[in-house]
Image: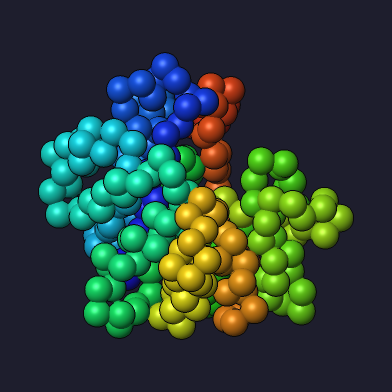
């Protein structure tokens, strides 16, 4: 199985820490967020990893390839005028240049979480799945709606009474799932010329094409957008130095 990490963002809310490094290299208790994600994948036997970089791409490439030279880095030169749907689009093109899709995991590079979450996702019987913190509701996070045992909506705008819980921005795709998702990315990026969309906008449409299931969260996670999030993550993961 392959993995795609979306790491092109600027991380302005974490300045001055991001003045000289991308958001994904900000450290939680001394460990960069991106390094934790890479270690989570490697611990679960996933070594075919592609990262889409953008802001401070050379810093990211040097930091990653110095330690893991086989990880592929795809640079999104238009990171300042695009969003992570565009990063996903570039990453999938690079990973599957022959358009022969295979199962893979995709994640945003600003989430610090336990490696057991990757294990549960890989072991899930669902070919297409979203890791969901069931019963939790946060305004800043993507929420999901479940109906008749399948996920039917993902968005930040879902009301509390309709939400199954929060997505932690970690996804599993089958070959069929990535094809549906990628085709919707193409619609937005190539046909509509809409480059500043969240990847979840395309994923939301793919939910009608392919059955996605929830993978209930069993472990710790925290999306790190600002200094308050960083402090909370360091407290949550205080035993991991």
| Location of residue 202 with respect to 77 vertically, above or below | below
Q: Where the C terminus falls, by quadrant? A: top left
Residue 82 visible to the viewer: yes
Residue 97 is left or right of residue 164, and the answer is left
- Closer to the camera in the image, 143 or 222: 143
| Location of residue 122 (image quadrant) | bottom left
Residue sticking out furthest to the right:
161
Residue 218 visible to the viewer: no
- Residue 53 in picture, x, y percent from top left: 31, 45
- Residue 84 in picture, x, y percent from top left: 46, 52
Q: Where the N terminus falls, by quadrant? A: bottom left
- Residue 8 in picture, x, y percent from top left: 37, 44
The residue lying at 75 percent from left, 59 percent from top is: 164
The residue lying at 28 percent from left, 73 percent from top is: 96
The residue lying at 25 percent from left, 53 percent from top is: 74
Residue sticking out furthest to the top:
16
Residue 152 is left or right of residue 121, and the answer is right
- Closer to the camera in the image, 189 or 230: 189
- Closer to the camera in the image, 219 or 209: 209
The residue lying at 66 percent from left, 61 percent from top is: 154
């Amino acid at each position: 199985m392959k993995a795609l990490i979306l790491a092109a963002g600027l991380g302005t809310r974490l300045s001055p820490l991001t003045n000289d490094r991308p958001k994904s290299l900000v450290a939680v208790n001394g460990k960069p967020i991106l390094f934790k994600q890479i270690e989570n994948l490697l611990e679960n036997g996933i070594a075919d990893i592609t990262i889409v970089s953008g802001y401070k791409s050379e810093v990211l490439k040097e930091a990653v390839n110095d330690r893991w030279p086989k990880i592929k880095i795809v640079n999104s030169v238009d990171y300042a005028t695009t969003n992570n749907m565009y990063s996903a689009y570039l990453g999938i093109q690079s990973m599957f240049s022959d358009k022969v899709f295979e199962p893979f995991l995709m994640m945003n590079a600003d989430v610090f979480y336990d490696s057991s979450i990757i294990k549960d996702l890989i072991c899930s019987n669902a070919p297409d799945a979203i890791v969901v913190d069931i019963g939790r509701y946060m305004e800043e996070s993507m929420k999901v709606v479940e109906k008749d045992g399948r996920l039917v909506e993902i968005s930040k705008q879902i009301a509390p009474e309709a939400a199954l819980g929060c997505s932690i921005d970690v996804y599993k795709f089958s070959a069929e799932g990535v094809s549906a998702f990628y085709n919707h990315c193409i619609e937005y990026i190539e046909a509509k010329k809409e480059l500043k969309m969240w990847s979840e906008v395309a994923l939301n449409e793919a939910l009608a094409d392919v059955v996605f299931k929830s993978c209930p969260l069993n472990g710790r996670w925290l999306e790190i957008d600002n200094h308050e999030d960083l402090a909370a993550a360091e407290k949550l993961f205080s035993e991991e130095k």
